[in-house]
Each structure stands twice: as structure tokens, then as C-alpha cells.
Amino acid sequence: MKNAQPDILFVMADQLAAQFLPFHGHPLVQAPNLSRLAREGVVFENCYTTSPLCAPARATVMNGLLPSRTGVYDNAAEFPSSIPTWAHYLRLAGYKTCLSGKMHFVGPDQLHGLEERLTTDIYPADFGWTPDWRLRQERIDWWYHNMTSVLQPGIAEITNQLEFDDEVAFLAIRKIYDYVRFEPEKPFCLMASFTHPHDPYAARRKFWDLYRGEDIDLPKVPRMERAALDPHSQRLYDVSAMDDYTVTEADLRAARHGYYANISYVDDLLGQMIRALEATGRLDNTVIVFTSDHGDFLGERGLWYKMSYLEPSAHVPFLVWSPKRFAARRVKEPVTIADILPTLTAIANDGVATLARPVDGRSLYPLLIGGMEDPDGTAWGEYLAEGAIAPLYMLRRGPWKFIHSPADPDQLFNLGDDPLELVNLAPSHPLAAKFRAEVEAKFDIPRIHSQVLESQQSRLMMFEALKRGHHFPWDFQPLRDASEQYTRNHMSVTDRDLKSRFPHAPDIEDKRRR
């Protein structure tokens, strides 16, 4: 059955930098399903995370707002239930909405408008991972990143992360079949959110063996001594204890090898979902959206992981595939993951995104249908979590990227001339002052700084209090009524067998002997 409204498959990877994908020019990584979607779909070449850390980025994906607008400052900040998400808007438009996988929601609300959630999360939903800016650059050892992820890559047939993503894909595929068998008249938006290729960089042999160790490329920007890094990058170097271990060239290649293998693994899981849509006859009427929450330095400059507005950490993939609706094209105008809420809402409502409150993103529907790009289009970012000691901002417009924090010297890069961001033009270029004035006009930085500090201290206190006495977890407990799933004595065996079959059998009653 073909719906007037499209079904939507929204797939999200974790810590996937755009530069490591074949449709962004990487010569080695194998991702045939993503490459097909990119070839036939709309690729936003310059999409940025609003906040290069899991929970604040994913909250923005859901609600279209920057962290200071919501209080979702870091990986342990509560996502308020009173903020509308795309799931609310799509439900109003008649959609079934469902999440399989990771979203790192913090707080007792683990749905945020979604009708169903199929898995628990891979990371905790409480206040335990709250950073403390009073400590400046001091590590919080029990949960901060360290270099063990870089030193353990290799072949692993099962890990915490692989177990999670296997379940995410299996349940997402089953949900596709459930929608088609039991509720075929309704459009659906199914989000499948994977934890790969996030470190640690261990991968199954099937995907590891797609690459030869000697072919793995080294970083485009070799390791820099700590003193040569900008002040924020120096803090990242310290908070992730990057000087605790010696990382050899072999370690570097192995980590990148595992990362590439896990991109191929996510691509394979995506392919399985596409094949399920094909098998059910729904693919032609499905819009597939793919993105990530943030990137990974993967050894560039000697840095790892994220928490920065430099390209490997901040530049993420974003594509929309629906060849019968949107002609293939590549859009250069800068966009962000804050644009996802209004864009999904527009897709579900024939191009119109009517929202209950203003958001920081804008609908990309006009660009999907071939509209002209805006040469002054601006991508904004705001980072308020660990690794920083004061609010950190990004402005991306045309070829220019400007990074500002009151704690550090400004940075200005012309990405057209300097894609590796090696020459900071801020000390001498007049645009730096203009962009800084724009940032300071848009954000009340002293007030935001004060609010972040207050939130951190409140949450640190509450986490200690909630460890005393009886503990009631906020972590999501999947609600699956197995007692109704297969054949039970309050059902007709024949009716259940016929209804759960897809494609449905011919009308057997026509063959009954009269």
C-alpha cells in the first residue's frame, strides 16, 4: 500500500565525521548503501553539529534548539519534557513514531513525544556525567574519555557496542514488518540510532577484513606538540589524558582501521533496513534521512574524539533520499542538525512546517525541492560541556568559520583556501571583529556562563543525594508485551497466521467448498 504521506526512515550514526565517508571524498572507506543514497539523494555538503557531544547534539536533533535554549548543556543535563520535538509534530500529522537505539536522553522522560521505544539506551540517563567548570582542566577520571579506546582496536566478534547495534537493527527491521502487517494504512517515522563508529575501535572480522592494514591512511595533519595546539585543543588533550600513553603509528593505523570497519558495519545495517523496505513494497514511498551527532578527530593533529568546532569533530554527514520527490543534488550552503526538526515536519506536511514555538533551525525543504542557496546562510554552534571552561561558539558562513570563547583567542579560517584549518586569520582579518560582534549580539554569554555553572553545581549535588537510599533509575526499560506477540488462546490461530504473513495470502475463502 502506498501512502499519500511518505514513510520516514531516520538513521543516525554516532561520532561519524563527514570526511571519512566516500561521498565526501574518502578514497578508502567502503559504504555502498550510503554511497547509493548520496548518489541518488540530496547531500548537504556542509552540515555541522550544533554541539559536538552526544546528548546536547541529540537533543537539538529532536527539538531544533541550541543548548542554552533548553538547558541540555552536556551529557548529564536533563532534556525538559515541555519542549516540542519532531515526534510531537509528526504524531499530529498522523504518523506512527518509533525509536530503536541510542539518543542519550537524560531525565525521567525517555520518549520525548515518541510513541514507542524499542531498546534501552547504551549510556546512563542520570546526572552522573556532569562536568565541573570550577575544576578548569582537571580530569574526572571515572567517566572522561582516555586513550584506552585508541590502544584496544582490532577484531572482536562481540562488544558492548556491537551487542547494542545488533539489537537496534533487528528490532528496527521487525518494526518495519510490523507496520506493514498490522498498521499498513498509517505512515510511520522510524528512527534507528546506532552507537557505531564511536570508539572503542573494535570491529567484526567481516568488516575489518574489508581493509588491508597497510592501506590505512595516516592523518592529513600529523600530531602536533601540545604547545602548538590552540588553547581549547590543549584542554582536550589534557581532559582525555592524551599524554598518558604512547600512541605509535601502528596504533594510529589500527584505530582508524577499526573506525573504517565500523562505518562499513553501520552501512551494512542500513542496507538491511533498506532491503526490508524493498521487501514490503514501501521503499518507493519512503524518505530516508541520514546524519550523525558529531565527528571524531581520529588522530588528526594528535587529537581524538570530539568536543571541538574544528572540522573533524564538527562537520557531519547529512543526506535526504527520496528520488521520486527530490532530485539528486549537492548543497553547499552551511546547515546544522538543528534544521532536522523543521525539515521532518515539512516532509510530513507537504512542505509546510508550522511550529508551536520558534526554533534555531530552519526547514531545508526549499533546498530539497531545488531552491536557490543563500550565500549568507549561517550555521551556528554552541558548546557548553566538558573540555570547555566557558561558552564556546561557532559561526560558519560561506567559506568562513569563526570560533569564539571568552576564555581563548578567536579563531577564523577560510575553509576554501585552508580546509585543514592550519592558518588562524583572526589576529589580522577584519571579518573576525565583525563575526565576534555577531556572536556577542546573538548570545548573552555572561548570563549563559552563569546558568551553566549553576546547573552543574545543582546536578552534582543531586547526583550525590540520589546515590543515598533507594535508587529509582531513569534508564529506559523497553515495554514489550510478549504475551500478545505470537499465537495465544484468546486469538484465532488461523487469523493470527494470516494477518502476520506478508505479503498476505490470496483470499482463501474463495476456495472453500460450498
Image (cartoon, rainbow, N blue to C red):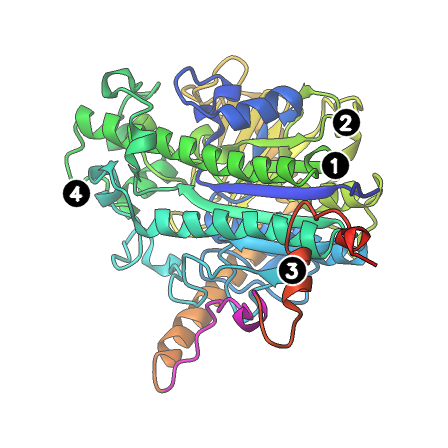
- Residue placed furthest toward the front: 514
Dividing the image into 4 quarters, which one contains the C terminus?
bottom right
Q: For label 4, count other residues whose C-alpha is less than 10 Å away and answer few (under 14), some (14-19) or many (20+).
A: few
Q: Which residue is mark 3?
A: 114
Q: Return the x and y of residue 86 as percentages of the image width and height.
A: 70, 52
Contact check, label 2 and label 1, Cβ < 8 Å: yes
User: Of the residues shown, which amino acid type is indicated by label 3?
Assistant: Leu
Decide which of 230, 14 is in the foreground and name it. Answer: 14
Indicate which label's residue lies in the foreground, 1 or 4: 1
**How far is the residue under mark 3 from the one under mark 1?**
21 Å
Left or right, 430 with reference to 29: right
Decide which of 147, 227 is in the foreground and name it. Answer: 147
Magenta span contains residue 480: yes
Indicate which label's residue lies in the foreground, 3 or 4: 3
Magenta span contains residue 307: no
Indicate which label's residue lies in the foreground, 4 or 2: 2
Magenta segment range?
470-486
User: Of the residues shown, which amino acid type is indicated by label 2?
Assistant: Lys
SS state under label 4: loop
Q: Return the x and y of residue 484 as percentages of the image width and height.
A: 59, 70
SS state under label 3: loop
Pick whichever of labels 2 and 1 is earlier in the sequence. Answer: 1
Q: Which residue is mark 4?
A: 244
Contact check, label 3 and label 4, Cβ < 8 Å: no
User: Of the residues shown, which amino acid type is indicated by label 1?
Assistant: Asn
Left or right, 10 with reference to 231: right
Pick whichever of labels 1 and 4 is earlier in the sequence. Answer: 4
Q: Which residue is mark 2?
A: 324
Q: Which mark is residue 294?
A: none
* Residue 391 appears in the figure: no
Q: Which residue is mark 1?
A: 285
Q: Return the x and y of residue 347 as percentages of the image width and height.
A: 77, 41
